[in-house]
Image: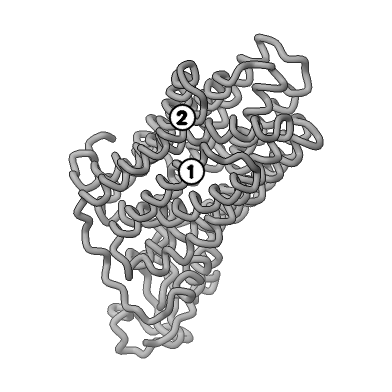
Amino acid sequence: MLSVLRNRTYRRLFTAQAVALVGTGLATVALSLLAYDIAGNDASAVLGTALAIKMTAYVAIAPFVGAVADRIPRRTLMATADLLRAAVAAALPFVTEVWEVYLLIFLLQAASATFTPVFQATVPEVLPAERDYTRALSMSRLAYDLESLFSPALAAALLTLVSYDWLFAGTTAGFAASAALVLATVLPRPVPVERTAGACAKAAFGVRLFRATPRLRALLALDLAVAAAGAIVFVDTVVLVRDHFGRPAGAVSLALGAYGAGSLVTALLLPRLLRRVPDRALMLPAAFALPVVLAAVAVLTSTSPGTWSWTAVLLLWASIGAACSAVLTPGGRVIRRSTADADLPAAFAAQFSLSHSCWLLTYPLAGWLAAGAGLAVTALTLGAVSLTAAAAAAALWPARDPSRLEHVHPDLPPDHPHLAGARPAAGGWRHGHHYVIDRYHHQWPSSGLTAVSRGR
């Protein structure tokens, strides 16, 4: 897996991602403690709302970033986003009101909604070989997992020396270092794109791509299953640790670190596993494991706290991390398989936006339910959401899902270049190839093997 780091361009991009993630991890711990200081027992509601605002920024901004990503140098976009994130992180220690938290979170995540889709679309161009790209996806997941493990541990160590306000300084430094690395990297020229549509139309195309491709619709359902389980970790951990178990601030870092440890172990195993197991066969069982774990969380939070139950919480958080990693890591492979190279920025931007719309639902649900009905009811409700989403994904993603599909073009002229080698058929011209939704293929082939097209 580490062999992809021999590529100098990818190595710098990966390092930029890693240092930014460490800063983000420190901010996650600090923000939880800041919310607890401001709101006390209502911290879960404040965090749920703040994270819902974060998701609103992602959902609203990411599609348009993908639409204009080929018009603005990618280094400029990513570095500018990093510098904006650094400035916002530097301001967070000075807030005293809840509304100030909400405003700064929106600005911070608007910048992240710019950086992440552009980064995701750049990696397959830097590493075009399928095997290298798979390794890069695992490396990216590994970076998230190491952050989930390392950042809470670092935060716990720092909290023994300084107040949590100083954790935001680490966040600022991480984003600034990421910007410097991006600016020092020479990126490949993006695939030339014929600009026949405006930014709004291109943003809409990314969403249409997901709507029209069965495996991408399933991927969105899987994102909802992950969001339901992840929300209880990121929103309710601070209340679970501080109120239910009565443990100190450092224990928040320990619980989040357990989640990261489970995700990390899974990410290390996935490259070898994905060479033997299809994406669908791995992702669906992992998604169905999530509601089982959440049911166990509901039982655990209904009982009196003790040493054994604290250990059980750490194990359950690690299990959620492992299952989420098994669902999320292959997602980039599914998108790449379903998208033309020129449409990768729009596809990743749409996935970024649509997947975070799932978190937009589950974050406030986890926060407001925990504040009003308790952690057990919250875990049961999110478990029901996760189970429904996993079942929907299984129904939407065909068990037999080949890349090459036979289909008929009813309205392309016979001399069109796309029809080279095609055979006459009832209603048009028939051929087969790796099938994706693009300007020649506007819907998925039905049982009648017909693809709607438009001549150009």
Q: Residues within 10 Å of mark 2 (few under 14, many from 20)?
A: some
Q: Is residue 405 left or right of residue 418?
A: right
The picture places residue 21, in percent across and down from the top left corner, at: 41, 38
Secondary structure of the residue carrying numbered label 1: helix
The picture places residue 394, in percent across and down from the top left corner, at: 60, 49
Which mark identifies residue 116?
A: none
Q: Residue at x 67, y 40 (%)?
A: 46
Is residue 138 among the parts visible in the rendering? no
Is residue 220 among the parts visible in the rendering? yes
Residue at the limit of the structure toward the top, as seen here? 307
Label 2 or label 1, whichever comes before in sequence order: 1
Three-letter residue code for mark 2: Trp
Q: Residue at x 35, y 79 (%)?
A: 195
User: Which residue is tagged 1?
Assistant: 91
Secondary structure of the residue carrying numbered label 2: helix
Three-letter residue code for mark 1: Ala
Q: Residue at x 71, y 30 (%)?
A: 40
The N terminus appears in which quarter of the rendering? top left
Which mark identifies residue 166?
A: 2
According to the image, what is the colour scheme of the structure? one colour
Res. 251 image quadrant: top right
Residue toward you, 36 or 296: 36
The picture places residue 66, in percent across and down from the top left corner, at: 42, 64
The reply to whether the C-beta atoms of the residues labelled 2 and 1 are less than 8 Å apart is no
Task: State the separation of the CA atoms marked 2 and 1.
Answer: 11 Å
Residue toward you, 145 or 60: 60
Q: Is residue 359 left or right of residue 2?
A: right
The picture places residue 246, in percent across and down from the top left corner, at: 69, 16
Q: Residues within 10 Å of mark 1 (few under 14, many from 20)?
A: some
Total numbered labels placed on residues in the image: 2
Q: Residue at x 42, y 32 (%)?
A: 147
